[in-house]
Image: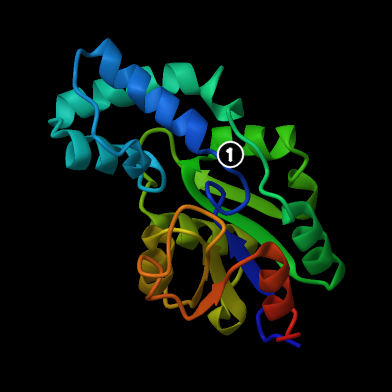
Amino acid sequence: MSRYSDLLFDLDGTLTDSAPGIINCAKHALSQMGLPQPENMMCFVGPPLYVSFPRFCGLDQAQTQEAIKIYRERYATIGLFENGVFPGIPEMLLRLKNAGKRLLVATSKPEKFARQIMDRYELSQFFEIIGGAALDGSRDDKNDVIEYVLAQAGITDRSRVIMIGDREQDVLGAEKCKIPCMGVLWGYGDREELSGAQIIAETPSEAADILLGKE
């Protein structure tokens, strides 16, 4: 049996394929502001928006705030449902839940939107806590979200906790919180990006096997 009992899951690129909605909303925001788009719009999938717009588009603080406002106006009604559950995810979650694992979400997506997505795609039933970023920007970094979820869950023993995600932000956030990370390859990150993860899983089925101590 795996020693991990408290499983923190990323949302975008780990549970759902959210890239279409994220990219469409980023394109919309940049278009509305008359700004050029980065060549690779996948750069918006993973990092918080307050990081992505300055880093990849050269926006200053005021422009970034305006871009996020426009982005979220579209995302709140259209973008969050330009989405879908990755194949094998419900089966993986059911196996883990039935084995007595404690499942929690720790996402850099605003918590309000994360809850709506989880409800829409019938994933909320598997999770004890759905924790995300704050809309006011006070809780955006992945390590801040992880700490928030651990506090909400009353978890003090981190030796049985693992973060499961598909991007470098998940690996780095877990490292800052002194917990291991499982990198998953069915999402948006590759082996090179996830090289700092302690464990790599190629499929949801393999992830469940590892987390249940069957590999």
Q: How many marks?
A: 1
> Which quarter shows the N terminus?
bottom right
176, above or below 152, in the image: below
x and y, in percent, of residue 53 in the image = 24, 35
Element type where label 1 sits in the image? helix
199, above or below 124, in the image: below
The structure residue drawn at horizontal position 25% and vertical position 26%, both measured from the top left corner, is 65
Q: In which quarter of the image is residue 4?
A: bottom right
x and y, in percent, of residue 33 in the image = 23, 14
Which amino acid, mark 1? Ala
x and y, in percent, of residue 154 in the image = 62, 66
The answer to whether one can see residue 127 in this image is no
The answer to whether one can see residue 197 in this image is yes
Q: Quadrant of residue 25?
A: top left
197, above or below 135, in the image: below
What is the residue that sits farthest to the right in this orientation? 98
The structure residue drawn at horizontal position 74% and vertical position 45%, both measured from the top left corner, is 124
Front-most of residues 208 and 149: 208
> Which quarter shows the C terminus?
bottom right
Left or right? Give the position of 191 relative to 120. Answer: left
x and y, in percent, of residue 207 in the image = 66, 71
133, above or below 104, in the image: above
Front-most of residues 125 and 155: 125
The structure residue drawn at horizontal position 50% and vertical position 32%, both measured from the top left corner, is 20
Q: How is the image coloured?
A: rainbow
Residue annotated with mark 1: 114
Instruction: Report crowding for label 1: few under 14, some 14 to 19, many 20 or more residues within 10 A (C-alpha).
Output: many
